Image (spheres, rainbow, N blue to C red):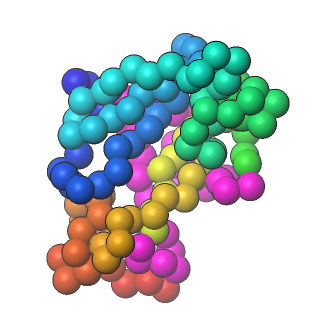
Amino acid sequence: DDRCPVDPCQECDPLLLPHPDDCAMFYKCTHGYACEMRCPSGLHWSSAMNRCEWPKLGDCALGAHPTKPNSRSNSRCPQRFDPNHPVLLPHSRDCTKYYVCVGTNAVEKQCPNGQHWSLQNSWCDFPQRAKCIAM
């Protein structure tokens, strides 16, 4: 499924991505396959909160994703958001975290317990294989 990156980490949480055309929908990517999901009635997908929220609390504006408290603008995120090819970035100070670019905002994510972000592979892995060096 070309809407999702292939997820080489079998134990990682699924990657959740906004739907490009409908605020009430999102994609749940697992092992490289996208499943189109719909939020409960009246709710919109919030990429910053990584869940369905009331529209006034969410961040859905088709084509624009404003910064929320748990996301930060990051100049390394591309200017154009492509949900088919999400950009993943390392956290500069914490090897157990990484960022998923949503628009020009970097949304912080946490690796599963005991794993570190691998810059070389762009997924969470065991520390001895990830070889992460936090600044």
| Rendered view: 72 above or below 46 | below
Is residue 2 at least partly visible in the picture? yes
Residue 133 counted in the magenta span:
no
Taken as a whole, is the magenta stretch helix, strand or loop?
loop
- Residue 45 falls in image quadrant: top right
Which image quarter: residue 86?
top left
Residue at 74% x, 30% y: name it.
Answer: 54
Quarter of the figure that contains the N terminus? top left
Which contiguous range is marked in magenta? 69-96
Q: Is residue 78 magenta?
A: yes
Image vertical order of residue 118 relative to residue 109, above or below: below
Q: Is residue 10 above or below residue 57?
A: below
In the rendered image, residue 116, in percent from the top left (x then y), is placed at: 33, 73
The residue sitting at 49% across, 26% down in the picture is 26
Does residue 114 appear left or right of residue 66 in this picture?
left
Q: Residue at x 27, y 38 (%)?
A: 30
Nearest the viewer among 117 and 36 is 36
